[in-house]
Amino acid sequence: MKIQRRRAVVVKIGNLRIGGNNPVAIQSMVKVKTSHTAAVIRQLEALKLAGCEIVRLAVKDRADALAIKTLKESTKLPLVADIHFDWQLALAAIDNGVDKIRLNPGNIYKRGQIKEIARAAKASRISIRVGLNSGSLPNTKHLTPNIKIADRMVRAGLEYIKIIEGCGFYDLVVSLKASNIFDTVEAYRKMAGSCGYPFHLGVTATGLPANGAIKSSIAIGALLLEGIGDTIRVSLTDIPQEEVRVARAILEALSLRKFGPEVISCPTCGRCEVDLVKLVKTLENRLSTVNFQPSTRQMKLAIMGCVVNGPGEAKEADIGVAFGKKEGLLFKKGKPVKKICFDDCIDILLKEVK
């Protein structure tokens, strides 16, 4: 099965482009105050190492907006200013070199203010995200009573887009995030038939980290399977690098991006005679430190813990090992090569995949 992506217009964010045939880009958000530049720079460096491609910054006051200039000098990552309530902070962020503005139609809604921001963004040749959240929707008294959240988000988004387009501005990205899967997926599906702008996918306020990763994977994965989505942010109550890790896993699972070898491993059972769980976790940590170059073909790496499915899975992989008691049989391209001991396994596998 090959995913047929929705053909959105191309929008530039710093040195990155989304939409069209461009790869689905990974975003995250700095989780410290933007004016605390030393701490922000540390998070930006960690995010870049983790594989993040776009980073959003909360701009709560003028000090945050002014800090963007310093941050732009410290990183090549595209930076997005997250603006709420005070429209003039968007203008200050633009003046200080930000690559994109996120506006929330629920708290920046006056036409004159929206138009001023659109004009400034157009003059600076940067993009704007119309970012709707179910928890802060604009006033919808003019709509039919009891209208569904997904419909409220779509209608509010289209009205907001129309105001910005009235300024001759079209470098737009759209997001419609709810805190549950169903409203999120429904909103994006409906908006997909109403505009051609690229979509920023995500679920907001996802709860506990493990639950949030699952909810995000289901909603984002369902939309990406339908070809909907051009950039994603997995929102977790966790360090931002974990958001990137989950986002990469989603894209790899759908074969939309390749970031390193695909690892196949068994869940273990009473037949397993080695500590395969420890082995796989160690491999995961070691692989995360390797900077793999983009490739059109993803290497498959199998680590199996017993003789039932182990040899078969190992033979199907580019490189595999099937363990018995204390030692395993190494396979390359489906052929057994040699026996290896448990303690040497990680080093041997990493040498093979690099």
Image (spheres, helix red, strand yellow):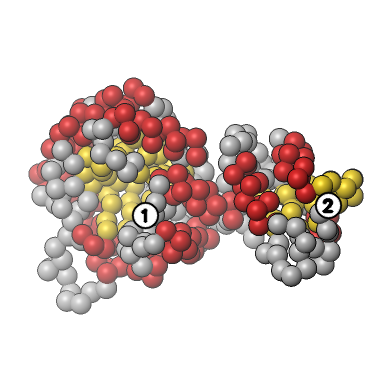
Name which residue lies at 18% across and 47% down.
Answer: 84
Question: Mark 2 highlights which residue?
Answer: 327
Kind of residue sitting beneath label 1: Thr
Name which residue lies at 25% across and 39% down.
Answer: 33
Task: Name the residue at the bottom extreme.
Answer: 146
Q: Is 40 located above or below residue 7 in the figure?
A: above
CB under 8 Å between callouts 1 and 2? no
User: What percent of the width, then of the height, locates residue 27?
Assistant: 41, 44
Name which residue lies at 24% across and 29% down.
Answer: 67
| Element assignment for label 1 | loop
**Quarter of the view holding residue 159:** bottom left
Question: Mark 1 highlights which residue?
Answer: 237
Category of crowding for the residue at label 1, using alpha-carbon neighbours closer than 10 angstroms: few (below 14), some (14–19), many (at least 20): some
User: Is residue 113 something one can see in this rendering?
Assistant: yes
Front-lying residue, 16 or 339: 339
User: What percent of the width, then of the height, locates residue 112?
Assistant: 9, 44
| Element assignment for label 2 | strand
